[in-house]
Amino acid sequence: MEAMDYFTLHEHDIKEDIKRLVLADSPSQNKELLDLCKDVIQSIFFEYFHVKATEYAMEHNGNHLRFEMGEGVEQILMVGHYDTVWDRGALPYREDENKIFGPGILDMKSGLISAIWFFKYVQSMNLPLKRRVVFFLNSDEEIGSPTSRPLIEEEAKKSMAAFILEPAVTVSGELKIARKGTSRYLLNIKGLASHAGNNPRDGVSAITEAARQILNIDALNDFEKGTTLNVGMMQGGGKLNVIPDEAHIGVDVRSVTQTEQERIDDYFEQLEPVDKRTNIDIDGGINRPPMERDKESEELFEIAHEEAEDLGFEVEEAEVGGASDGNFTSLHTPTLDGLGLVGDGIHAEHEHIIKNQIAERFALLTNTLLEVVNE
């Protein structure tokens, strides 16, 4: 049976698995709930089949999971995360005519179910696998993958290709062939307080220094190169009759290339106060390197593009500003991202997937993987 027919036939069961996983709330920094969600993932896996499974126990974060099928020497990697930005009970699960809503349903619990059903399809059809397929799930992607990054990179180094189960580009359904790298910086500025009426010249305003720094940071934007800096947080002062002695600036940086990312990082490492009477302490740095376009990732996309055509629909490529764990895998192996479901509302109250595209996206992932695994 062809994959599209198989997933269409089993669409009710697929939606039940998605619902079950979405109802297992899994905020990134709640280990108790993450562990309960992890148990749901394992139970769904083992309801269907037995695969080689490994659990990486974390003391404070949720545990990370690894599933493997096939006996080949070479390996193909799928990566997904089961943590979400949503607290317990933040959003209801609901359906309307062609949408299913719920916390983390698009980002990215429905994508996780597509990987599980890939394994189920392979087993049900008794299909050969020339290469091993490894599915790695982490629990801390939404907070930067601090404990899972080494494990993800270790798997990527052993893999011929990586497929990331983040959702496709919202609404349009494009696959993600490149992502910007991300950096974050926090500038803590110290000045000198004084009475704004009686002794204004005795004070050194941390807010004034912050304002000067913000203008300098804004001047680093280079939209032609795709380098953007956003001062998304500014705090300081308090009482209007006091020269403020403290201010804080938070900066988000996005870069298309590693060269640009390092240029901005060098800037912050060498940053000096404009007013030498102030002091600036800087925290942060590079979080995720860019997932840069290359020939190998383009070849992976071409395979997916052809498989989509065979399934009767078009899929295009996109370069996006958001980062994922694909930024890590792409350092070591060709990577294609956005192979999850289609929908809208990531991190918003209207987060949803499109029902009538479930089967075709499951089939796209499955057929693309099988082509790469068995080529």
Image (cartoon, helix red, strand yellow):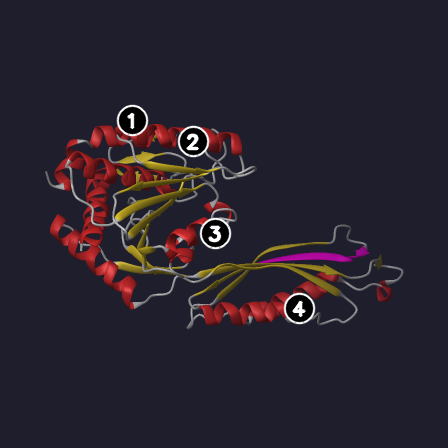
Q: Amino acid at mark 2?
A: Cys
The answer to whether any part of residue 138 appears in the image is: yes
In the displayed structure, 19 sits above or below 197; it is above
Cα–Cα gap, marks 4 and 2: 46 Å
* Residue under label 2: 37
* Residue 255 picture location, percent across and down: 46, 65
- Find residue 150 and name its label: 3
Which badge, 4 or 3, comes first in the chain's sequence?
A: 3
Which residue is depicted at the point 29% across and 26% down?
47
> How many C-alpha atoms fall within 10 Å of the one at disc 4: few (<14), some, or many (≥20)?
few
Mark nearer the viewer, 4 or 1: 1
Query: Which quadrant of the rendered structure holds the N terminus?
Result: top left
Mark nearer the viewer, 2 or 1: 1
Cα–Cα gap, marks 4 and 1: 60 Å
Q: Which residues are magenta?
A: 242-251
Cα–Cα gap, marks 4 and 3: 38 Å
* Residue under label 4: 212
Secondary structure at numbered mark 4? helix
In the displayed structure, 256 sits above or below 344; it is below
> How many C-alpha atoms fall within 10 Å of the one at disc 1: few (<14), some, or many (≥20)?
few
Mark nearer the viewer, 4 or 3: 3
Q: Amino acid at mark 1?
A: Glu
Cα–Cα gap, marks 2 and 1: 15 Å
- Asked if the residue under mark 3 is in contact with the one under mark 4, i.e. CB atoms within 8 Å, the reply is no
